[in-house]
Image: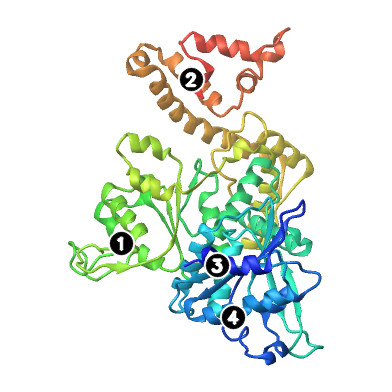
Amino acid sequence: MVLGDSPISAYYRISYGFSDYSMAKQTVLIGLLGATLDSGRGSARWERWRPTVSLCQHEDLLINRFELLCQRKFIALAKTLLDDIATVSPETEVRLTELEMDDPWDFQQVYSVLHDFARGYEFDTEREEYLIHITTGTHVAQICMFLLTESRYFPAKLIQSSPSPSRGRGGPGVYEIIDLDLSKYDRIASRFQQEQKEGASFLKSGIETRNAAFNSLIDKIEQVVIASSDPLLLMGPTGAGKSRLARRIYELKRARHQVKGAFVEVNCATIRGDAAMSALFGHTKGAFTGAVSSRPGLLRAADGGALFLDEIAELGADEQAMLLRALEDKVFLPLGSDREVQSEFQLIAGTNRDLSVLVKEAKFREDLLARINLWTFKLPGLRDRIEDIEPNLNYELEQYARRTGKRVTFSREARERFLKFAVSGEAAWAGNFRDLNGGRITTEAVADETERLRGSWHAQHASEGHDLLERLVGKERMAELDLFDRDQLAAVITVCRRSHTLSEAGRALFHTSRDRKKTVNDADRLRKYLARFGLDWRDLR
């Protein structure tokens, strides 16, 4: 029952009045009746500090309306408080709301009741400012009031009151207003910003990356990692650093006391059939030929920690179904067992494939994708952030020195030559840096390394280029092409795929012959070449 609409409440409004709305915002106080602190009988009650009444006694705090919440059994005390508030602050309108709450120490019940009140209350933030009194009520109720204010169900500030130390237990006491918008507190805000900066730097292994888009992506990942335990999906090409980032995510959550268990990593492309089921979900003794003993499985090993499933697209249909249930119900059946086991873990999934395409091809479960696609981050390859090549190179050299105790440095000319090659259109960077051996890297060593990279990239991209060419022109058209045209066109397609613009691709393809031409238009030259085979730049993207 809401007494604000009852005859008794109407009586108090008529008798004691309340302020009309003016240009200044009205102050509305919402608080729980304190069955112990607010109690008192006879004239002696005025000698006690009573928080609900005392808040209305402050000359510098004008309360236009007081929403007083109480249980049915304390209605008599509430009526006394209404009389007393009318005495000390006749301009304050008091509305009583009865709460259907049997056990004020039951967190679920108290939160539900106060949540319902907040959802049903008609807040008018343009005309009114709200204060939530957190001094009265049980500790459970105070916590619930705080949580509902923090989550903005109450669009309010908190107010906390206490008796004045200099005036004993009587008088209005003192109060403090607390704004939970922490951005308004410079020192707190700067501390949080510093923690976010440190978290992002940790995820990047301390590498001072320069690519703005990549840095922004890591900042978003840091915020999600700290706030959520839902699955994370890391997408990106091989060598983009998914595995290293997954481990850093786990280590950051562990440092913030959000996980206690182990970090378990598995490449799904390396397990198939019964081996996959057994590796992931475990098996009982005798579950299949060769199962001479029981095995707990990787999901159980990750209980309380994090499970990184790299190349998750390679999981079979049965494994996908079991994984989905493990994510939704936190239980699964080991191979050969009729007893479910429990495991709760943070899932981090990695893939270099488009899972939505695999769903359309019926190769990946749509419901599993929906479950792991809550927080998806696409990591760019190193070739898409060439400004980060130098800081990554510095990091790799430092890591090598820590692992081996051997210091590796470049001569100045060798460093300049390597970085010039590394940021050129010729460099594909399909993976990360390999270990650089030796003490001081010379120009000869750089020349050997660049030739090795060219060779490995050419072999890799030749295969990729032929596969893409076949998808673009079809098998029949492919068979009509001479081997010469087929190989050349595949190479051109490969360069186009890793270039951001038509002009960039043209410069990479014609970087030698263009110097012999009086007028240079690499983009037009490439466009005409593709047109000979019925291809367009947009087809290749």
Looking at the image, residue 254 lies above or below residue 167: above
Task: Tell me the residue at 63%/58% (across/down).
Answer: 155
Question: What secondary structure is found at the residue carrying circle 4?
Answer: loop
Q: CA distance from mark 3 to mark 1?
A: 24 Å
Q: From the image, tell me which residue sits under label 4.
A: 34
Q: From the image, tell me which residue sits under label 1.
A: 281
Q: CA distance from mark 2 to mark 4?
A: 71 Å
Task: Tell me the residue at 69%/74% (across/down).
Answer: 86
Question: Which numbered disc, 3 or 1, marks the residue that appears first in the sequence?
Answer: 3
- Label of residue 539 in the image: 2
Question: Which numbered disc, 2 or 1, marks the residue that appears first in the sequence?
Answer: 1
Foreground of the two, 228 or 284: 228
Residue 90: x and y in percent read: 72, 70
- Badge 2 vs badge 4, beta-carbon distance below 8 Å: no
Q: CA distance from mark 1 to mark 4?
A: 53 Å
Task: Tell me the residue at 57%/45% (across/down).
Answer: 432
Foreground of the two, 270 or 54: 54
Looking at the image, residue 445 lies above or below residue 246: above
Residue 26: x and y in percent read: 71, 58
Question: On the image, which quarter does residue 313 sit in?
Answer: top left
